[in-house]
Amino acid sequence: MTSRTTLLKRITPYLGCVFLFSACASNVPLDKNSKKSVPEQKDKSTIGQIAKADIDRMADVEMRENAQSLRLLMLKLYKRNPQELKKSTSDPAEKMIDWVFDGATQHHYQLPEINNLVTTDAIFLAFNPEFKGDRVLAFTVGLHTMLLKAHNDKTEFYFMDSLDPQRIYNVARNIEIAVWKLSNARDEAGALYLLSNEINDHDKNLSFEREFGKMIGRTDLYALVLAEKSQRMISRVVQNLATALFLPF
């Protein structure tokens, strides 16, 4: 009896640590005022996870979180530019966004509304003065398909997949260029093609800048980790955003 009591006293602190780490590892909100949970792989306990390395799971998270950011940005752009949504549909913005992202297996991003253009061609179209269609659609599809192409048109990654860190790094720079265009490209009358951030005497809205910053940070981080893992060099590029050209990806 005495030996059991002594043993219990010895292991109790360790049991406390086990329960503490178990609680920390669970998928709980980041804080009591936040509804967003720590990202978690939905299929983490399935057989498919056996074929994934940590770098593959990181790619899964990067693509999933960037897609979520783009969905949010598309919604925010439609709210700031409601005339663009009307050019595509009379449905609510949320339904349009679901169709763009969840319907990719049907339309494969070949959308007549934006002349079937993708990647940087679609981004250029969003700021083409002659384009009369949905600029929000063109801008968002351009960014998303650019990310997909740099990741070999995949959103799930396994041991046999081989990604090029240079292409992913270049996409991060291209997002920076696209964001600059969004904030600065104007028509002949001097009006912005698309409204996003707003700073004036009455309002200060930098939520677009913050969300784009998250995308650039995620993409940059994954490119650097992938380069370290694969022992491949990245050629870093410094450009003047006002005159920069999109990099190959």
Image (spheres, helix red, strand yellow):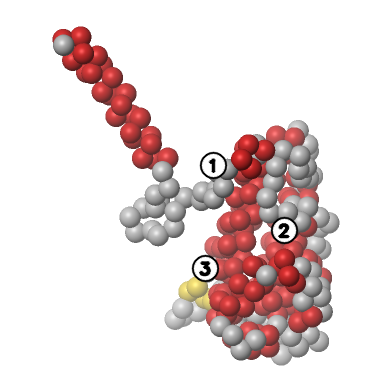
**Percent position (x, y) of residue 205?**
50, 73
Residue at the image position 47 percent from the left and 50 percent from the top: 38
Q: Count neighbours of disc 1 (C-alpha within 10 A) and say few if under 14, some if 14 to 19, many if 20 or more.
A: few
Label 2, residues with CA under 10 Å away: few <14, some 14-19, many ≥20: many
Q: Amino acid at mark 3?
A: Ser
Q: Residue at x 78, y 42 (%)?
A: 162
Q: Position of residue 177 (x, y in %)?
A: 72, 64
Q: Is residue 234 visible?
A: no
Closest to the camera, between mark 1 and mark 2, is: 1
Mark-to-mark CA distance, 2 and 3: 21 Å
Decide which of tag 3 and tag 1 comes sooner along the chain: 1
Quadrant of image for the C terminus: bottom right
Give the residue number, with chain letter if any, for mark 2: 147
The label on residue 45 is 1
Mark 2 element type: helix
Please report the residue visible at 75 percent of the width from the left and 72 percent of the height from the top: 107
Spatial CA distance of label 1 from label 2 is: 27 Å
Kind of element beneath mark 1: loop
